[in-house]
Image: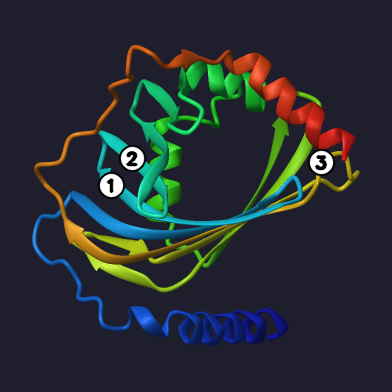
Amino acid sequence: MKRTLIYGLLAILSMLLLGSCAGQRALTGPVDAVSARIDAQVKALRLDETAGGNIKMKRGEAIQLSLTKFGIEGVRVVFTPDSILFLNKLSKTYLRTSFRDADRALTGGDGTLNFANVEAYFWNDWQTGSDDAVLPVGGMFPVELHTSYGRSLRVGEHRLPLRITMELSAADGAVETGSVKLKLSKVKAADHWTPNTQVPSKYRSLNAVKLLRGLLGKAASK
């Protein structure tokens, strides 16, 4: 009974917070690709940043997230079944790695990090109100990931969440608590979209392992 009451209160709160999305119409028919405006807030490593942008997703093929500031794209992240691309246009750097290598670095190679799970995460294929997981980041810091989903929109045979909140924490305090909040709006079908994985020739490649160790070291020193 207590859990039911809590879930009910969370549902009401989500509806109030997402009142501005009430005008979004369901996308009927065979829709497997969408584009949407996204508003993101990131709180981590003593940062508190907000940004706009867009997200484009094609089932089974790609997820592309672009964040903008003052109308200028600063960061692009592209997930495909084989790779992860992180493009920083502000520093003119990029990181391209495989899911296999990223899984080995972040979870110890247990196979949890793969495109199918990332896709299911963004689309909330499990259709749950919340989800909890423990990630053995770098094999050093067990980080708890709590995800909560807000109101969803019918998109073809799927239900796309319009609000996703991810909270990271470590019980031993080794990594500073952080959160990412994503709010989707203006969802449209994008059946003819293809991901942009081009990297300008002048961009400098980053080493994924060194970057991960640097982030973990920075987090642990806070």
Q: Which residue is mark 2?
A: 63
Q: Compare marks 2 and 1 and give the one earlier in the sequence.
A: 1
Residue type at mark 1 is Lys
Q: Is 44 positioned to the left or the right of 31 in the image?
A: right
| Residue shown at the point (35%, 53%) measured from the top left | 71
Q: Is residue 143 left or right of residue 80?
A: right
Q: Quadrant of residue 193?
A: top left
**Helix, strand, or loop for circle 2?**
strand
Give coordinates of residue 79: x percent, y percent: 38, 32
Residue 138 in view: no
Q: Which mark is residue 56?
A: 1
According to the picture, the residue beneath numbered tag 3 turns out to be: 175
Question: Residue 83: where, in percent of width, then height?
Answer: 39, 22
Q: Element type at marker 1? A: strand
* Mark 3, other Cα within 10 Å: few <14 / some 14–19 / many ≥20: many
Tell which circle, 3 or 2, labels the residue nearer the N-terminal end.
Answer: 2
Q: Residue at x 47, y 71 (%)?
A: 150
Q: CB atoms at circles 2 and 1 under 8 Å apart?
A: yes
Disc 3 or 1, which lies upstream in sequence? 1
The relative height of residue 213 versus residue 50 in the rendered view (above or below) is above
Q: Residue at x 33, y 12 (%)?
A: 201
Q: Which mark is residue 119?
A: none
